Amino acid sequence: MDNILEVKDLTKKYDAFELKKVNFTVPKGMIVGFIGENGAGKTTTIKSILNLISMDSGSIKIFNSDIAKNKIKIKEEIGVVLDDSFLSDELTPQDIHKIMKYIYKNWDKNLYFESLERFQLPKDKMIKTFSSGMKMKLKIVTALSHHPKFLILDEPTSGLDPVARREILDLLQDFIQDEKHSILVSSHITSDLEHIADYVVFIHEGEILFQKNTDELLESYGIVKCGEEEFHTINKDDYLAYTKKKFSYEILVENKKAFQKKYDISIIDKPSLEDIMLFYIKGGK
Amino acid sequence: MNSIKGLLVKDFLLLKSYIRNIIICIGLFATIIFSDSSSDMSIVGVMMIMLLFSMLVLTTFSYDERQHADRYLLTLPISRKDMVIEKYILAVITLIMGVVIGTLISMGLTYFLLGKSPNLEEMFSATMGCMVAVVFLQAVQIPCIYKWGAEKGRMQIYIVGMIVFVIGILLSTFAPKLQLDFSVFNNYDFLIPVFFLILMALFYFVSYKLSNKIVNKKDF
């Protein structure tokens, strides 16, 4: 399978934080959800991918081409949505068209204005009068109006109400209908990604803990609830993490079928991405 | 080149609302002239309008900073170099706008409202001097903003500006002691504007090199 993005051994060191040999890929035609708690390194990784910050070591390839060497050509082909930055909110959507038509060779005026209409975004009002949901929709519409092949979004649903979040997820699913298109989307709202992501990359304290197929992950992982006595009979190598409740233990297992075979435990719950993330972050081993 | 055009369009669109303030200032200036018809305010007028225009570059930085627009712009097909070049082109355009609009308004007001003919020679030398000052100000401002940001960098701009100003004063104090002979220039008055133009180009060039270096190393 072709990879649209390949991040290899990406390292970046700050005083209080470090990306430790980050490795992951975005396969062609797929949505990859990039999850992790706030401060785990999602935004730093995305900034490195976009060449906004220098990396200490490693390599990043988009469309099989080194981003550091071919950034302008690559950026013609990608659309980017950042949580905390956009054009000044003193501008209007109409102004954005006037700017972007010079910046992107493939800027599609008709597509842009049609999308504005579709999402009921007024073209003559300043962005500062928009709600958070409207602003995010405008960012995505802008990122899509030059026919990119790869979309990178950093926390597109954070701070939005459920209706706006759903609309944005639908927008992403529309984009991925074309099998040549791919998406990397970071979020700490894992339930959003559960619906749309084909793969999940989990980053914790600057380290990638896994990259897995979402369905396989949710099917194979399981949460076992047991008492203290039972818990102590379980081999440490057979679970990933545990949390101690008031009167019981909960453990996260990677392969619930194998676990069920080995131990005589019949009830194993299906975890959500959030459960898995919390076990890794808060759980003990 | 197209990306530079796009950035210039962005900055001029941002400055649309600022034009209202400039109109108010010009209105105030006209009122001052009306109230005191005995003095010649035309030179002050040109200088004021030029200074007003020189602030435009700083204003665009402030607008952009509020939304971290630099970071976003670098996700588009725009190189860091083009981003810096655009600000200097904007600086030159606003300088020329300030000179042309300032001169026209001042001359117009002096001539039509006061019925006096403006002193062109005096106005020219004052404008030249003011242009050098404005270019110097911009040349200090732009790298400082790239280094520290438009809001945080205000104090640094003043400090760097003051340091360079003090060096200038010291040079002008000690230069006469070197007893250099400039009398040869007396017959070549036309060289003075050329010298000023070269000086302004030099300010911009050094400043651009510095900004480029800062931006290339910067994490956005």
Image (cartoon, coloured by chain):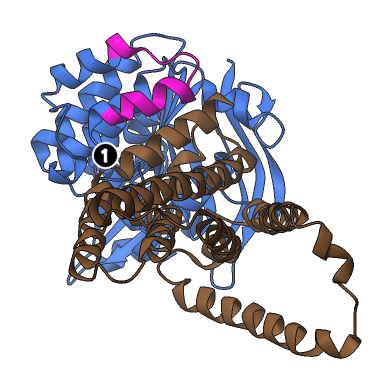
Q: Dot 1, how many residues are within 10 Å of its Cα: few (below 14), some (14-19), or many (20+)?
A: some
Residue marked by disc 1? A91
- Colour of the chain lettered B: brown
Position of residue B33 in the picture relative to residue B137 (left or right): left
Q: Quadrant of the N terminus of chain B?
A: top right
Q: Position of residue B22 (x, y in %)?
A: 28, 53
- B85 part of magenta stretch: no
Q: Is residue B173 above or below residue B187?
A: below
Q: Residue at x 21, y 23 (%)?
A: A170
Q: Is residue A256 above or below residue A95?
A: below
Q: Which residues are magenta?
A: A95-111
Q: What kind of element bears circle 1?
A: loop
Most frequent secondary structure within the magenta stretch: helix
How far across and how far down the image is residue B126, in percent?
A: 54, 63
Give coordinates of residue A222: x percent, y percent: 31, 43
Q: Which chain is displayed in blue in the rendered image?
A: A
Using the image, name the chain to which the residue with label 1 belongs: A
Where is residue B27 shown, x and y percent of the image? 20, 56
Q: Is residue A185 visible?
A: no
